[in-house]
Amino acid sequence: MIRQTQEQADPEMVAITALAFIAADPERLERFLLLTGTQPETIRLGARQPGFLSGVMQQVVGWEPWLLEFAAYAEMAPADVVRAADRLAAET
């Protein structure tokens, strides 16, 4: 997937990959929707709103099982995922 070091990984691309990771599994998607209050039909619209992708990343890094699963999915070190989330949060 991403295979970039923290300096090269674009935080927005990491977040888009995280959204795909969440959407790829019905249980993850259900958990995400319940925790965020997002409706399935508004995800695309939400993804264009400032802060939405940062919120996606906060969900991923905020629960260790997702962090570890996503890091493996994206072929990144968990610490690099956290750094990408922090950088994205700082940009919004």
Image: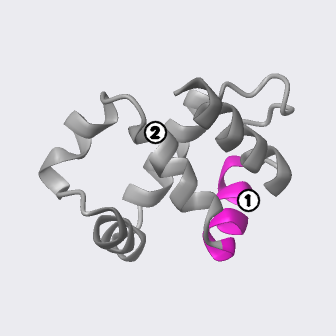
Q: Nearer the viewer, residue 50 or 19?
A: 50
Image position, residue 92 (x, y; %)? 51, 27
Please indicate whether residue 51 sits to the left or right of residue 63 in the image. left
| 44 w.r.t. 41: above or below | above
Q: In this figure, which residue is indicated by the disc labeled 1?
A: 72
Q: Nearer the viewer, residue 46 or 41?
A: 46
Element on which disc 1 rests:
helix
Viewer-nearest of discs 2 and 1:
2
Q: Can residue 1 be seen by looking at this rendering?
A: no
x and y, in percent, of residue 59 in the image: 52, 60
Instruction: Determine whether 74 is above or below 68 in the image.
Output: above
The residue positioned 13% from the left and 50% from the top of the image is: 41
Above-or-below relation of 27 to 18: below
Q: Is residue 35 left or right of residue 66?
A: left
How much space separates mark 2 and mark 1, taking CA atoms? Answer: 19 Å
**Residue linked to disc 2:** 53
The type of residue carrying mark 1 is Ala
Magenta includes 65? yes
Q: Residue at x 64, y 30 (%)?
A: 90
Image x and y of residue 29, in percent: 35, 66
Q: Residue furthest left?
A: 41
Magenta residues span 64-74
Q: Main secondary structure of the magenta part?
A: helix
Q: Residue at x 70, y 40 (%)?
A: 86
Quarter of the figure with residue 34: bottom left
Q: Secondary structure at mark 2?
A: helix
Horizontal side of 7 relative to 81 (left or right) equals right
Q: Is residue 30 magenta?
A: no
Within the image, what quadrant is residue 66 found in? bottom right
Three-letter amino acid code of the residue under disc 2: Leu
Side of 76 relative to 91 (left or right): right
Residue 11 visible here: yes
